[in-house]
Image (spheres, rainbow, N blue to C red):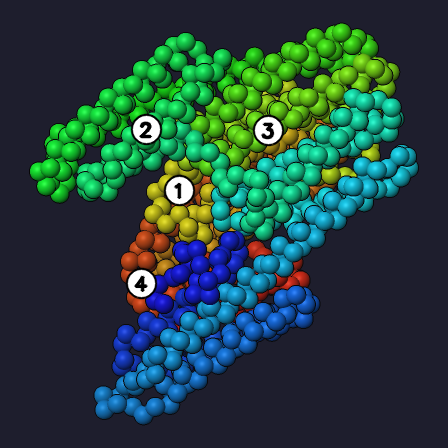
Amino acid sequence: MASSPCGNSSFDSGLEIKTRSVEQTLIPLVSQITTLINHKDKLKKSGKTQRALQRLGQAVSVAVGRFVTVGQVIATENLELREEMSLACSEARRAGDTIARLTDAAGTEPLEPDGRNTAFTDRTAMVKAARMLLSSVTKVLVLADRIVIKQIISSRNKVLITLEQLERVFSFQEFVQIFSQFGNEMVEFAHLTGDRQNDLKDEKKKARMAVARAVLEKCTMMLLTASKTCLRHPDCESARINKDAVFQRMRFALELVVQIVTDTRPSTDAETLPVSIYCGIRDFKAKVEGLREQLYCVTRESLTALLERIAEQTEDFTDSAYTSHEHRESILQLCHLARQELRQLGAHWELAQSLGASEATEEMEISILKTCHCVSELRQELHRAAVGPALDLLKYHTEHTVLKALKVSGGEGNLEGVDEYSCRLTEQKEQLVETCRLLRHVSGTEPLEITCVHAEETFQVIGPQIISAAQTLALHPTSKIAKENLEVFCEAWESQLSDMSILLREINDVFEGRRDKRTYLSLPRPGKHLPNLKVVKAVKLDAEEQSTVAKLGLELRLITSDLDSECEKWDDHEHDIIRQAQSMSSMAYSMYLFTRGEGLLKTTLDLFQQAEVFSEEGFQLCSSLQALSSQVGDEEKVMITSETEKLVTLCQQLQVTARSMVQGKSATFLKVQSSVQHTKGILEIVVFLLPACHKLARKYLSESSSLSSPQIWREKHLAIPDKEDPLNNKNTSGFGVKSLEHHMASLTFLESK
């Protein structure tokens, strides 16, 4: 109990912690329990320390009482969880009362001859009560989290019902009414899933949630135009095919969200993605290098089988029509060389075992190095074979020649031209699908693998949809809605090509050993799910404005690089300060991409919302810095406090700028410049502060005793300001995990003096 269980996947209760909010809420309680249990190691306590422990026990009991009250309200409002929640609350209250009684009894015992008390004579009871408290509070939090899941599923069901109604409508008037309701429901669903995505601990689940939300975002506009086209031309078969494909894709995404939040997969679905070549090579190298210390940890046959599996997967490259002859020959040669090196290693390995060696011999060491070097060369060659052609392909499609030709042919009613360019688009689609399949093998991380699979599926689906939309337009060349529908699907194709460009850069970053720079996915952007049929298009920068703001963007990129370098120096990457700094770096990077006309932020509205979210993260960092300053000496405190005040001011200025209403092209562009400039100023302060904070965090971690350690740990991980704190102006009303977090915060003031 003296160590934090938060690093594990489960607590004594056996309940898996899947979200960061639940995990972070438990940390202060673990800290308090650690304080109590660690005091058991020193039986004799001074009167001052004894009284402090007594106050600690009483305060724990009071805080748990308030916490339990919230849990009981949740139980009252959710009948299906009432019994479980009530039982967990009763256990928590009983454990809290026991801790208070034990600490109180210790304070009233007679003094020893040396003037000290003997603390906690009933050690077993204290440990048992502490374990029960941690287990029961964990149960309450996980049950509250189930309510969040229930909200997501309920929201999804509402969307699904309305979706089915939209699919069956036959009049424009009815469609307008239902789509208005559908738009509102999609906004609610997007916010719930966005919160869940950012809260998930599992990076693979986060990536899958991002995929599902991206599909829903793009399909919402497709659904609008495809449905309108079908209503306008009810007898058109290509229009019906086009619409049906959109509805099917949306149902897939809605089902995927439920699978993620409930942690279930359909029986027909594979449990995991097939192992990529990158992962296979990584595992193979790890096993080979493990032979240095343990000659008997694996068998020769298992290593041979693993290498053969890697060689078999390389056939995806060698059999591909898009792999050059040079790459194909090099891959085959490296596979052959790897087999040779492994056979040589096997011979030295068997000799070492026959001699009874306990570790690798010199000959084995040389063979291990050669084998690992060979498969590393294979990985590099596969990376070049996948990424190089992908970059060339994206450059080739920059002008979107085929899409433009399809629009022209459709608008002229030229069915033969549509058929001709549809064949060319199908060829492009197959090439892009094959490219994504090869990129998955070299992506380097499971989240990027999932993104590659999503890109592959997107091209596979949108290609035929563009063709059916073009056929509809060719049959009805004067139809404005058919033309608009084709435009929407072509924009989705272009957007996916842009996303693929970002994906390639991320894959290169991983390959070259740089930190995986993930573009921050904020909540749904304004203008994407408006329920009205006349969608207002947000402003995009023109070429001149893009050129002007590009210089600012470059400065922002350089600062994010400096920030990333400082972040890499930290040992504890779970520290609040470093997590918040990395999050801000990711958001700033997405803003930099906007200044280049790239990335997920497409319009000025996207940029301004990202800036607002960035400022909120900056306020959270200020709270963490304030918590750190309370632990340091006066001189250090003055420096941190001074810089934090500057940071607060800049965050407030950025927030005001992002929220301000402007009209006109010139005013909008000035707002863009100000937003980027304020973001740059904030990051400059963060880069200045990080080295000092790193030094102080290491210093006070090494100096912390068993008594002070929980305090530092607690203040590091859960610095929740009072309601009046200007850094925390979010509404915490309503019950659920966030409300319970607020009540758990009362545990943070319990440290003994």
Give the mark toward the camera: 4 or 3: 3
How much space separates mark 3 and mark 2, taking CA atoms?
29 Å
Q: Please state which amino acid type lies under the numbered disc 4.
A: Ser
Q: Earlier in the sequence, mark 2 or mark 4?
A: 2
**Which mark identifies residue 307?**
2
Q: Tags 3 and 2 in contact by the CB under 8 Å rule? A: no
Residue picked out by circle 3: 457
Please tell me how crowded label 2 is: few (under 14), some (14-19), or many (20+) other residues with Cα within 10 Å. Answer: many
Instruction: Say if residue 405 shows up in the picture.
Output: no
Please tell me how crowded label 4 is: few (under 14), some (14-19), or many (20+) other residues with Cα within 10 Å. Answer: some
Q: Tags 2 and 4 in contact by the CB under 8 Å rule? A: no
How much space separates mark 4 and mark 3, taking CA atoms?
52 Å
How much space separates mark 3 and mark 1, taking CA atoms?
35 Å
Q: Earlier in the sequence, mark 3 or mark 2?
A: 2
Query: In the rendered image, which quarter contains the N terminus?
Result: bottom left
Q: Earlier in the sequence, mark 3 or mark 1?
A: 3
Q: Earlier in the sequence, mark 4 or mark 3?
A: 3
How much space separates mark 1 and mark 2, taking CA atoms?
36 Å
Identify the residue shown where x is 74% and y is 11%: 418
Horizontal side of 428 relative to 518 (left or right) equals right
Q: Earlier in the sequence, mark 1 or mark 4?
A: 1
Residue 599, compared with residue 142, is above or below; it is above
The secondary structure type at the circle numbered 2 is helix
Q: Earlier in the sequence, mark 1 or mark 2?
A: 2
Q: Please state which amino acid type lies under the numbered disc 1.
A: Cys
Instruction: Say if residue 266 shows up in the picture.
Output: yes
Residues 268 and 203: in front is 268
Residue picked out by circle 4: 704
The secondary structure type at the circle numbered 3 is helix
Q: Please state which amino acid type lies under the numbered disc 2.
A: Leu
